[in-house]
Image (cartoon, helix red, strand yellow):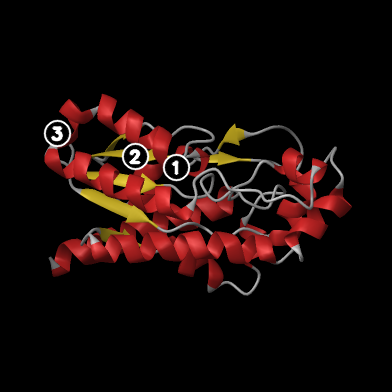
Amino acid sequence: MKICIFGDSIGKGVQLPDEGHYEKVKLNINELTGQADLVVDNYAAFGCTLTKALSIITNHASELAGYDNIFIELGGNDCDFNWQEVSDAPNAEHKCKTPFGLFEETFHKMIEVIRTNGGKPIVLTMPPLVAERYFKWVSQGKQAANILKWLGSVTSIYRWQEMYNLKVVMLAKKLNVQLIDIRTSFLQNHHYEDLISKDGIHPNEAGYHLIYKTAAEQYRTAAQLG
């Protein structure tokens, strides 16, 4: 079985240990998924948005038909803001990296490119962030009070990400793309924050363990039904 991944740092398996810098999680994906012959080509990139992913996918278009499936894990960077600009001008209007309209348009193009070139896309939902931790992380070295003034409340960070996650779900349904829901697997844990790194957004090793396990289970179920 051969798959490829287009995504951001979560698709790449990046975590932030309590002590140290960002690093790739070290897990045996073949063992976790129960697929000994699984071959994975990972084209995910730190900071990747839908627009950047579309460019990467287009560059690999001739290879897409050679995979059993194309896994798409995106959205976390698209809904993010330039926090320094927010800190400097809390009364101004600020747009996220990929506004809603562009997000939907680019998502359509991405799926079209994959299918036109013989690929079979599968979309993953986003793991939930931990608002308090993420606010603390993005506020480092900035005027936290100004950022909070613009946000209105720390929890609005979570709600904004949830809105983009729902958009992913709706677009997958609209385009008849298989969806793997990793977000629910996180939220079923009463203390899902224990599965997230100290920056509030990247899963830790336990979180990635849950992602790979959930993806494998839902993939197998869909294959049996399909």
* Contact between labelled residues 1 and 3, with CB atoms less than 8 Å apart: no
> Can you say whether 94 is above or below 56 in the image?
below
Q: Compute the Cα span from label 2 to label 3.
A: 13 Å
> In the picture shown, does residue 167 fall above or below 141?
below
Q: Is residue 1 visible?
A: no
SS of the residue under disc 2: strand
Question: Which residue position holds label 3?
Answer: 66
Report the disc number at residue 37: none
Q: Secondary structure at mark 1?
A: helix
**Is 195 on the left-hand or right-hand side of 155?**
left
Earlier-in-chain disc, 2 versus 3? 2
Q: Which residue is mark 1?
A: 11
Q: Position of residue 188 (x, y in %)?
A: 53, 74
The residue where tag 2 is placed is 5
Is 194 placed above or below 48 here?
below
Rounded to the nearest whole Å, what is the CA distance between mark 1 and mark 2?
Answer: 7 Å
Mark 3 Cα shell of 10 Å, populated few (<14), some (14-19), many (≥20): some
Q: Quadrant of the C terminus?
A: bottom left
Which x, y percent locates residue 71? 31, 46
Q: Disc 3 or 1, which lies upstream in sequence?
A: 1
Mark 2 surroundings within 10 Å by alpha-carbon count, few (fewer than 14), some (14 through 19), many (20 or more): many
Q: Is residue 148 visible?
A: yes
Residue 171 x/y as whole percent: 32, 61
Q: Kindly identify the residue that appears in the image at 51 percent across and 50 percent down.
A: 208
